[in-house]
C-alpha cells in the first residue's frame, strides 16, 4: 500500500477489515501504526490560504476543536464500519448524545423517548429540555401503539436505546423508524450495547446513530470518546455548527487509542458475547437468581425483537437476585474476579448496581417505570476464561 489513504475495494470489505484498514492517512514516512497528531492549531502557507480554509473553500485543518488528522482517521473508520456517510467524534459518549438530540431542536419542539434509557440521557430529556421550552414525553419502548399515539400528536425527535440500559429492553427500530418517517421526526438510536458489529440501526431506518466509544470501541478502560453518525448533508447543516461552536471536541490522543481499539473490536465482541451467553444460562439455573435478562435467551421479554435485530446476544447481562438491595450488594461484594464498576464493554468483566449508581438520579417511581428495582445487577462480560468467570459468578450467587 502506498503512502496516503487507499480506498480501493473498501465498499466490499467486511467489518473486521474496515476496523483495521479504514480511514488510513499515512504521512510521507509511511508509518504502519496510525500517526498521533498532538497539536491544537495548524500553520498556513499564506493569509489567503488561511482565509480559504476558514471559509471552507480549501480542504485542510484549521483548529483541533474543529478536527485533526487523527480524529479524521477515526471518523472515516467508524463511518465505514457503520456504513454511514459520515461521522463526528466528541470528547465523551454523553457529549455525542447530548449534541445529537439538542442540536436539531428549538423551543416549542416535542420529543418522544423510550422509558428505558441511560440515567444521564433520561435527565437531559426530563430535566434539561423542558428548561428550553421543549416538550418531552416517555413511552414504553416495546409498545408500538404508544409510539404511534404519541408521534401522531406531533414530534420532531425520537430517542431510543436497544438493548437499553440497564435491563436490556428491546425496541423495534424498524417499526419505530416507519412511524417517525410518517410523523416527520428524526430518529436517534443509541447503539452502544449492541455495537455496530451486532446491530445496524441505519439499515433498520434510523436517521442518526450515537455511541460511547469509551465502551467496546476502546474496550480496555483507557479513554473517553463519543461518536455521531448520519448522512453528510444533515451533519454539515445541523451538527457541524453546534460541534464547532459549543466545543465537545475529542482529544487526538483519545481518538488514536480508540483507532487502535477498533482493530480488535470484532474479535473482542464475538468472544465476550459467546461467554455472556454461557453465563446467562448458568445464572438462570441458579436458585438465588430471581430473573436473568440476556437478549438472545428465549425468556427475555423482547427476545423476538433482539433476535431479528442483533446477530448475537451481546456482551451484557442483567440479573435480579433474592433479597433486593441486600442480596445484590452481597453478590457484588462476593465477586473475586469481577470488578464493581459502572463502566461496560471492557476486556475486564464489570458489574454494578444500577439503582444506586448509573440510575441513582431517578426516583423510585421513574426506576419502576422501566422495570428497575434494587434487586437488579448489570453485568458486563469481559475476556477472562469462561470457566473462571462462571465459577466466580456462581460463588457470588451462593452468598445471596
Image (cartoon, grey):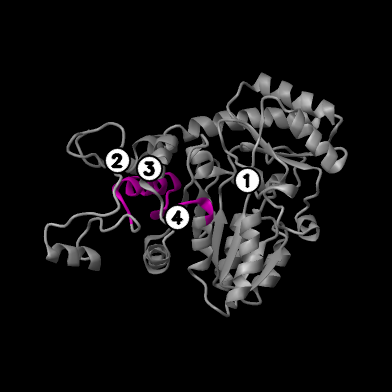
Cα separation between marks 2 and 4: 19 Å
Range of magenta residues: 67-94
Q: Are marks 2 and 4 in contact (CB under 8 Å)?
A: no
The x, y position of residue 221, in whole percent, is 52, 37
- Quadrant of the frame with the N terminus: top left
Could you give the CA–CA distance between mark 1 and mark 2, rounded to whole angstroms? 33 Å
Closer to viewer: mark 4 or mark 1 = 4
Position of residue 74 measured from the top left corner of the image (x, y, whole percent): 37, 45
Residue tagged 2: 24
Above/below status of 75 relative to 316: below
Query: Mark 3 or mark 1, which is nearer the start of the sequence?
Result: 3
Q: CA distance from mark 2 to mark 3?
A: 16 Å
Q: Which callout, 2 or 4, points at the residue further toward the start of the chain?
A: 2
Nearer the observer, 294 or 385:
385
Residue on which the image places disc 4: 229
N-term-proximal mark, 1 vs 2: 2
248 in relation to 332, above or below: below
Distance from disc 3 to disc 4, alpha carbons, whole Å, reads 21 Å
Disc 1 crowd rating (10 Å Cα; few below 14, some 14-19, many 20+) is: few
In this rendering, the label closer to the viewer, 2 or 3: 3
- Assess whether residue 378 is covered by the magenta stretch: no
Q: Residue at x 78, y 27 (%)?
A: 396
Residue 153, given in percent of the width and then of the height, sits at 66, 77
Q: Give the side of residue 398 with respect to residue 143, left or right.
A: right
Quickly name the residue at label 3: 253
Where is the C terminus found, in terms of image quarters?
Answer: top right
Amino acid at each position: 500500500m502506498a503512502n496516503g489513504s487507499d480506498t480501493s475495494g473498501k465498499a466490499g470489505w467486511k467489518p473486521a477489515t474496515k476496523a483495521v484498514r479504514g480511514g488510513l492517512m499515512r504521512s510521507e514516512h509511511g508509518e504502519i501504526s496510525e500517526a498521533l497528531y498532538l497539536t491544537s492549531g495548524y500553520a498556513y502557507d499564506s493569509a489567503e490560504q488561511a482565509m480559504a480554509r476558514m471559509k471552507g473553500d480549501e480542504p485542510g485543518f484549521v483548529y483541533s476543536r474543529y478536527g485533526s488528522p487523527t480524529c479524521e482517521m477515526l471518523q472515516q473508520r467508524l463511518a465505514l464500519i457503520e456504513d454511514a456517510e459520515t461521522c463526528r467524534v466528541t470528547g465523551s459518549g454523553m457529549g455525542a448524545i447530548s449534541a445529537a438530540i439538542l442540536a436539531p431542536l428549538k423551543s416549542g419542539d416535542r420529543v418522544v423517548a423510550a422509558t428505558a434509557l441511560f440515567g444521564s440521557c433520561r435527565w437531559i430529556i426530563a430535566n434539561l429540555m423542558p428548561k428550553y421550552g421543549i416538550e418531552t414525553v416517555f413511552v414504553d419502548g416495546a409498545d408500538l401503539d404508544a409510539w404511534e399515539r404519541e408521534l401522531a400528536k406531533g414530534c420532531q425527535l425520537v430517542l431510543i436505546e436497544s438493548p437499553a440500559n440497564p435491563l436490556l429492553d428491546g425496541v423495534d427500530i424498524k417499526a419505530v423508524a416507519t412511524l417517525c418517517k410518517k410523523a416527520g421526526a428524526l430518529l436517534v438510536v443509541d447503539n452502544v450495547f449492541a455495537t455496530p458489529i451486532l446491530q445496524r440501526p441505519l439499515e433498520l431506518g434510523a436517521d442518526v446513530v450515537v455511541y460511547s466509544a469509551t465502551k467496546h470501541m476502546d474496550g480496555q478502560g483507557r479513554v473517553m470518546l463519543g461518536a455521531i453518525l448520519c448522512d453528510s448533508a444533515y451533519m454539515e447543516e445541523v451538527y457541524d455548527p453546534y460541534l464547532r461552536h459549543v466545543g465537545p471536541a475529542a482529544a487526538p490522543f483519545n481518538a488514536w487509542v480508540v483507532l487502535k481499539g477498533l482493530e480488535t473490536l470484532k474479535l473482542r465482541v464475538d468472544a465476550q458475547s459467546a461467554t455472556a451467553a454461557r453465563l446467562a444460562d448458568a445464572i438462570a439455573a441458579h436458585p438465588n437468581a430471581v430473573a436473568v435478562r440476556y437478549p438472545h435467551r428465549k425468556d427475555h421479554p423482547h427476545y423476538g425483537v433482539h433476535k431479528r435485530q442483533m446477530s448475537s446476544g451481546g456482551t451484557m447481562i442483567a440479573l435480579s437476585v433474592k433479597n433486593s438491595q441486600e442480596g445484590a450488594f452481597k453478590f457484588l461484594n462476593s465477586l473475586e474476579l469481577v470488578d464493581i464498576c459502572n463502566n461496560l464493554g471492557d476486556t475486564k468483566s464489570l458489574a454494578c448496581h444500577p439503582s444506586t449508581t448509573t440510575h441513582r438520579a431517578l426516583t423510585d417511581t421513574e426506576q419502576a417505570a422501566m422495570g428497575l428495582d434494587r434487586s437488579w445487577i448489570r453485568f458486563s462480560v469481559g475476556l477472562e476464561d469462561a470457566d473462571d468467570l462462571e465459577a466466580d459468578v456462581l460463588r457470588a450467587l451462593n452468598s445471596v
